[in-house]
Amino acid sequence: MRTAIFYRFGSASVRVPEGRHAEAEELVQTAFFASPASTLGYAQVRHYEPLAGSISSRATPGGHDSNQLANVLGMSCDNPARSSVEAIEQAAMNDVSLALEQSWQALLSRHVADCQSLFNRVKLRMWPDASHISADRRIKDRRDPGGVALYHKFGRYLLISSSRNSPKPLPANLQGIWNPSFAPPWGSKLTINVTIQMNYWPTAPCNLFECALPLVDLLERMAERGRKTALVMYGCKGWCAHHSTDIWADTDPQDGWMPATLWPLAGVWVCVDMMKLARERYVIGDDGSEESAGERGCAWRGPHHTRLGDSDGAGRHMELLLKDSTLDNMLDNHPPFQIDGNFGGCTGILECLARRWEPTLYGAGVTLLPACPKGWEHAELTRASRP
């Protein structure tokens, strides 16, 4: 697992720890940690390269245009006895070299194009829109319809950023990728008794099916480990999982609150949601009569107010979400921060404006404005068909 961060800045102050050496042309700092009692090891490589001029230790450099900084973190979750520290570090160094081979403009353009290819599939605008007011003031004082649309956009951004397909993908956890703590609440795990389901509510209505692929990968790994759990604990065939899992796809009971700990149906719940999602993407082959057209409307599973057509209740719920459960930076405040609130709100906003019927023998359809709250009358919603 490796992640790369690339920066460009006009000036910099590079502090060199005692015992380190800073060369005139570049500064490379490497750190590695591994514990015999741990299965984790990581290598961090920071590469500072001046585009013009030189790097100055403990001072702000001048006389050149800008600096580039590439920060790569490489990590192995394998047994340290079977993994190579040097291999992790070398892979991180290779990523640094690849990043610095391209200009920051090229990297930025690639990033923007990648994000917008997913983000622009849905467009929601609402009026009046107090976009001239900062987000924190809109949350506390204004809560205008345009701010509701902004909250929806922010939810899509969070999912696009925290759940992407890759050779070894990981789904969005309790804090997504915005966890600042080494000991976060509930271990920032993958809680599969409601949280991870809410995390992926936006995938179908927001046309972000690719973002669900990391969850599918996790389910496949859980199915392997869950066979032993089902056999040893319950003497059953098949597989099962309990209320929480982690990056190793653990399926055994966790934590000490018995009503949740001993619940063995989490895998079933996640599978049902993924089967519904797959049904919207499945294309019938040559032996079928026609191709599945894919999902054209919203497929959110709650909240109850919108499903009951209760526009007042839906509006009140959204007002409380913004007023009492949203931080100044628009992240959900449980408290503490849990990202599922952002994803639930993101999907709920669409559900108020357009609700898709579940497919039946008679087909599927869309109900427009099933629970439109007061003040949301002036809005524009477009959704691209599946790519």
Image: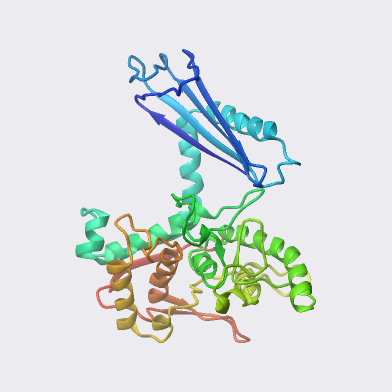
Q: Answer with left or right where residue 184 lies relative to residue 283.
A: left
Residue 100 location (% of width, % of height): 53, 27
* Quarter of the figure with the N terminus: top right
Q: Of 184 and 294, which appears nearest the observer?
A: 184
Q: Residue at x 71, y 70 (%)?
A: 284
Residue sticking out furthest to the front:
37
Q: Residue at x 38, y 76 (%)?
A: 352
Q: Quadrant of residue 303?
A: bottom left
Above-or-below relation of 29 to 354: above
Residue 350 location (% of width, % of height): 41, 70
* Quarter of the figure with the C terminus: bottom right
Q: Answer with left or right where residue 122 lies relative to residue 256.
A: left
Residue 256 location (% of width, % of height): 56, 71
Residue 238 location (% of width, % of height): 77, 74
Q: Is residue 130 visible?
A: no
Report the number of discs.
0
Q: Quadrant of residue 230?
A: bottom right
